[in-house]
Amino acid sequence: MDISNYLYLSIILFTIGALGVLIRRNAIVIFMCIELMLNASNLALVTFSRIHGNLDGQVASFFTMVVAACEVVVGLAIIVTIYRSRRSASVDDASLLKN
Amino acid sequence: MRTSSHLVYLIALPLFSSAILLLLGRMADKWGHIFATLISASAFGVGVFEFMAMHSHTGANRAATQKLFEWISVGNLKVDASLLLDQLSICFVLLITGVGTLIHIYSIAYMDHDKDRRRFFAYLNFFIAAMLLLVLGNSYLNLYVGWEGVGLASYLLIGFWNHNQTYAVAAKKAFIANRIGDVGLSLAIMICFTQFGAVSFDGVKAGASHASPAALTAIGAMLLLAAAGKSAQFPLQSWLGDAMAGPTPVSALIHAATMVTAGVYLITRSNFIFDASSTARILVVTVGVITLLFGAIVGTAKDDIKKALAASTMSQIGYMILATGLGPVGYAFAIMHLLTHGFFKAGMFLGAGSVMHGMDDEINMRKYGGLAKLMPITAVTFGLGYLAILGVPPFAGFYSKDKIIETAFNQGGGKGIILGGAALLGAGITAFYMTRVVVLTFAGAKRWKDGSHPHESSVLMWGPMVVLAIGSIASGFLLSAGGALVNWLQPVVNASHAEGGKELMKPLVVSVLALGIVALGAGYAIIKYRTVPEVAPEKVSIFTKIARKDLYQDIFNDAVLVKPGTALTAGLVATDHHVIDGAVRLVGWVIGEVSDVLRKLQNGYVRSYALMMFVGVFIGALILWVVTA
C-alpha cells in the first residue's frame, strides 16, 4: 500500500477536526475536534518517520500525546466548571468579555 | 587707567536697600522711606568721593575701572562684569544720585498718604541701582542689563497705582514701546560681536577704526532705535505721555531727568561708531529734529500739566539727540543740555507735583489759575525752571540750548540752515507752550472751585524744588565757564578731532535770534491766554485738533502696528487651531474610524478567532510555499 495514503488520511482527519472547531458550538465537540486534529498530526508525524526511516517523528508524536493529555485535564476541568455555572456548554454563550 | 574698589558700592547700596525693603515687607513700613533716602544720599556721597578722586588724578588716570567677576566665557565671547567710571559716567552718576536723592526727600512728603510708600521707595532705589549699572557698565552687555533694569523700574513705577486700569495699560504701553528699542540694542550688540568679536566699549572702539561702513551704519541705526525707544524719540515716542500715569516724583526722576536720557548716553558713549558713519549721523539728526518739533507741537495743545511737561521733555531730548548727531563737537553740548535739563525739568515736575498736591490731584491746567499768590515758593521755583528752559540768560538753558542751535547752524550749507532753523523754531514753540503752562497755572484769575484749598507744600517738598531751582540758575554757567564740561569730556568724545566748523553765524547773533523768537512765542502765549475758558474750546483750528491728538501718533500706531499685529496674532491662532490642531485631530479621527471597522473583528466568539487563526496560518503557509517554490 502506498505510504502516502496515510498522509491523505491525516489531512482528511485534520480538516474534519478544523471544520468541527469552526462550525460546532458545543465545547465538548470542539474539544474532541481539537483532539482529532492533534491525532491527525500525530499520524502525519509517524508517517514521516516511516518515510525518512528515523525515529524523530515518533518522538515528536510522543510529545504531542503528553501535551494532549495535559490539555484534556485542564480543558475538561474548564468546560465542566463553565457548564456548572451556566448550565450550557455552548462556546458562544461564553463571550462575555466583548463590549 | 587706575582701578578702584569702591565703584561697586554705587550700585550695591541702592540694590541692597531695595531688596531689604521688598523682602521685609510691611515690617519696614515705618522706616523704609527714611532708610531708602539715606541709602540714596550715601550713594551720592560715594559719587562725590569718586568725583574728587578723579579730580586728583590727571590724564588717562582719571578714569577708573573695577572688575567684579568673569561673567561669560564661551568660545570667543569673553565678557567680564566690570565697571568703568570715566568723565562721561561721573556726570550721570552725580545727576542720578543727586537728583535722585532730592526726589527721594520730596517723595517722603508726596507719598505720605499712600499705604504702599515703602514699596514705592524700594522701586525708586531699584531704579537708581539699575540706572547706575547702565552708566557704569564697561561693555554693551553690562549696559544692557542696566538698560533692562531701568525699563523694569519704569514699568513698575508707571503702574504703581495699577488698581487703576488706564494706569496699568500705560505701564504696559511704555514697556512694550521700550521692548522695540531693546531689540535694536540687542541687535547692535550681536553685530558688534560678529564684526569685532568684542562687546566692551574698548573692544568695539578698537574694531570700529577698521570696520566696513555698512556694519558701522547698521550698528549706528540699531543703537539709534534703542535710544529712540528709551528716550521717547520718533517713531517710538508715544509712550512718554501716558507714562505720566505714574506718581509725579517718578515723572520727575525717571521720565524727565535720568532714564529717558539714557538714549543720549548710549549715543554719546558710542561716539566712535557715529563719528565713523555719516549715514548714521544723518539718521540721528533727522530723528532729533523731528522729535524736537513733534514734542513742542504736542506740548502746545495739552491741558494736563504733566502731559505738557512730558511733551516738553520729549522735545528737549530731541535737542540732545540732535546735538549728538552733529559730530564730535555736539556730544559735550548734548551732555550739558542733559545735565541742565535734569535740573530744570525735574524742578518743574516737582513744582507740578506740588501744585497737584495742593489742588487735590487736579491735573487740568484750565482749572488752576492765580496760584502764584497761594503757592509762592512753588511759583518762584517753577518760574526759574521756566526761564531756564526758555534759554533766557543767564539761566541754565541759555548756555546749553543756544550752543546746540549754534552748532546746528555751523554744520554749514543747506543742512546747517535746516537743522538750525528747526532748532530755532522749536525754541519759539517751547517758549509758547511753557508760557502757556505758567500763565494757566500761576497767573490770571482763579478758576478752581471754592471747595479746594490750594496751599504751599511742606518743606520736604519745597526744599528739593529750591535746590533744583538753584541748579536751574547756576548749572549752565558753571558747566560752560571756560569750557569746563567740554574740556572735561574731551578724553571720552574726542572733540579735538572735530573738523573746524565753518562759523555760519556768530554766537551773539544766534543768541539774539533765539531770544527774539522766544520773546515772540512767549508774548503770543501771554496775549492769547489773558482769559482762559474752563472747558477746552471745541471750535479750534484743524492744527490744534491734530496737536490735541498727539499728531495722530496713537491712531497711526494703532492702524499701522497694533491692528496688523492683532490680525497677525488672530491669524496665527486660527492657523494653530485649524491647521496644526486640525492635523492632530485628523489623525485621531482616522484612527477612530479605522478602529470602528476593526472592532467588529473582536466579536467575542471563539469560533471566529479560530477561523482567523486558520486563515492566517493558511496565508502564511501559502506565502512560504510561493517564496520557497
Image (spheres, coloured by chain):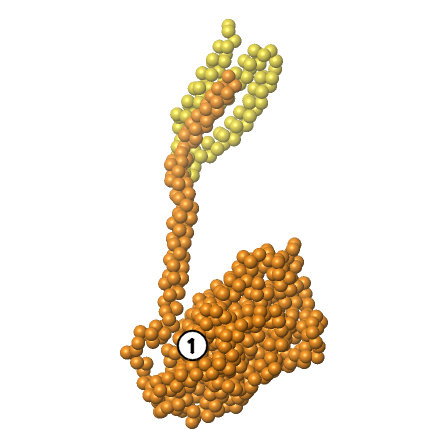
Chain colours: A yellow, B orange
Q: Work out whether B205 lies above or below B481.
A: above
Camera-nearest residue between B294 and B96:
B294
Q: Residue at x 50, y 86 (%)?
A: B393
Residue with the mark numbered 1 = B425
Q: Is residue B503 visible?
A: yes
Quadrant location of the N terminus of chain B? bottom right
Task: Specify the quadrant of the image occupied by residue B258.
Answer: bottom right
- Residue projecting furthest to the bottom: B373
Camera-nearest residue between B621 and B245:
B245
Task: Specify the quadrant of the image occupied by residue B482.
Answer: bottom right
Q: Dot 1 falls on which chain?
A: B
Q: Residue at x 40, y 48 (%)?
A: B579
Q: Is residue A88 visible?
A: no
Total marks drawn?
1
- Residue projecting furthest to the left: B539
- Residue projecting furthest to the top: A1
Q: Would residue B46 appear left or right of B389 to someone viewing this image?
A: right
State the SS at label 1. Answer: helix
Camera-nearest residue between B626 and B210:
B210
Q: Residue at x 40, y 62 (%)?
A: B561
Residue B595 x %, y %: 40, 39
Q: Residue at x 51, y 73 (%)?
A: B410
Residue B9 x %, y %: 65, 75
| Amino acid on which disc 1 is placed | Leu
Residue B242 x %, y %: 43, 73
Residue B622 x %, y %: 47, 21
Q: Work out whether B389 lies above or below B589.
A: below
Q: Residues within 10 Å of mark 1 (few under 14, many from 20)?
A: some
